[in-house]
Image (cartoon, rainbow, N blue to C red):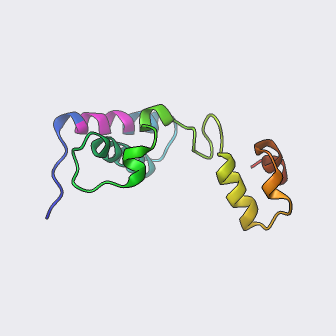
Amino acid sequence: MPQQAWSKKREREYEHIKDGLESRGHREDEASEIAARTVNKDRARAGESKRTSKTSTQDISSSRRGGLRSHRGEGGRTKDQLYAEAKRRNIKGRSSMSKAQLEKALGGR
């Protein structure tokens, strides 16, 4: 069954997010993807879509989250993201490290 089309409000929301991302230096294709994901998550949270993921409905809202989980955003990567990277690189002692220690061990990336 085809997905229900976005409402006029969701179309405006998509364009607003996309334009904002492009003005901050994101490529057009990247901005389009982020905007679409954000609108779809908002639709899921509002009960406007038939299929939803657990994170779409139970996680903090897209607008509140902002750049909290981005690799370049305000707070940088989360401790969980840093820990996963340290695990992938097989860094010893990672389980007892703080977020700052994980960042230092990973080379401040």
* Residue 61, percent from left and from top: 42, 37
Residue 96 screen position, x and y as percent: 82, 52
Left or right of 2? Residue 16 is right
Depth check: give the residue in front, 97 or 26: 97
Q: Residue at x 50, y 36 (%)?
A: 65
**Residue 90's spot in the image, x, y percent?**
79, 68
Q: What stretch is highlighted in magenta?
A: 10-17
Q: In this view, does 72 lie to the left or right of 6?
A: right
Judge whether residue 11 is colored magenta.
yes
User: For residue 21, what is the image quadrant?
Assistant: top left
Whether residue 9 sits left or right of residue 69 in the image: it is left
Left or right: where 33 falls relative to 93: left
The number of discs equals: 0
> Is 86 rendered above or below residue 100?
below
**Residue 106 visible from this viewpoint:** no
> In the rendered view of the protein, which quadrant contains the N terminus?
bottom left
Q: Residue at x 29, y 46 (%)?
A: 44
Q: Is the magenta stretch mostly helix, strand or loop?
A: helix
Q: Can residue 39 be seen in this view?
A: yes
State whether residue 7 is above or below residue 82.
above
Query: In the rendered image of this protein, does residue 45 appear above or below residue 80?
Result: above
Q: Quadrant of residue 6?
A: top left
Q: Where is residue 35 in the image (x, y as percent from the top left)?
A: 37, 43
